[in-house]
Amino acid sequence: MAVPKKKTSKARKNQRRAHHALRGPGLQACPNCGEPHLSHRVCANCGFYKGRTAVAVEATE
């Protein structure tokens, strides 16, 4: 098995891990109601998708 010749420094280790950060979901504004929703998904607030009502959503009070 291969063994490292030198200890990896904290700086080198952290530079390598600089791209491991998590990002939030890509939210888009609904063109109908303006609520944020995931792209390419039906809006949970109004049921709107691709210029038409895709799902009937009951009004919650």
Image (tube, helix red, strand yellow):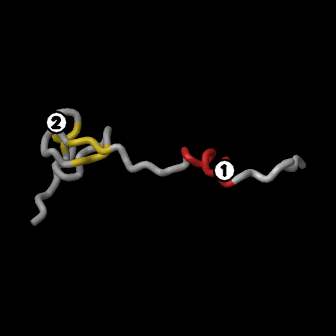
Q: Quadrant of the C terminus?
A: bottom left
Mark 2 / mark 1, whichever is N-terminal: 1
C-beta proximity under 8 Å, tags 2 and 1:
no
Residue 43 in the image, given as x and y percentages of width and height = 23, 47
Of badges 2 and 1, nearer the viewer stands 1
- Residue found farthest to the top: 51
The one of 9 and 27 positioned closer to us in this rendering: 9
The residue at 55%/48% (across/down) is: 20
Residue 27 in the figure: left or right of residue 19:
left
The one of 30 and 49 positioned closer to us in this rendering: 30
The local secondary structure at tag 1 comes to helix
The local crowd at label 1, few if under 14, some if 14 to 19, many if 20 or more residues have their Cα within 10 Å, is: few
The local crowd at label 2, few if under 14, some if 14 to 19, many if 20 or more residues have their Cα within 10 Å, is: few
Instruction: Tell me how far mark 2 sits from mark 1, CA to CA.
Output: 50 Å
The residue at 17%/33% (across/down) is: 51
Res 35 label: none
The one of 61 and 13 positioned closer to us in this rendering: 13
Residue 36 in the figure: left or right of residue 13:
left
Q: Quadrant of residue 32?
A: top left
Mark 2 is on which residue type?
Answer: Arg
The local secondary structure at tag 2 comes to strand
Residue 49 in the figure: left or right of residue 14:
left
Q: Total marks drawn?
A: 2
Res 13 label: 1
- Residue found farthest to the bottom: 61
Residue 19 in the image, given as x and y percentages of width and height = 54, 44
Is the residue 52 above or below the residue 24 in the image? above
Res 52 label: 2
The residue at 31%/40% (across/down) is: 39
Mark 1 is on which residue type?
Answer: Lys
Residue 42 in the image, given as x and y percentages of width and height = 26, 44
The residue at 67%/54% (across/down) is: 10
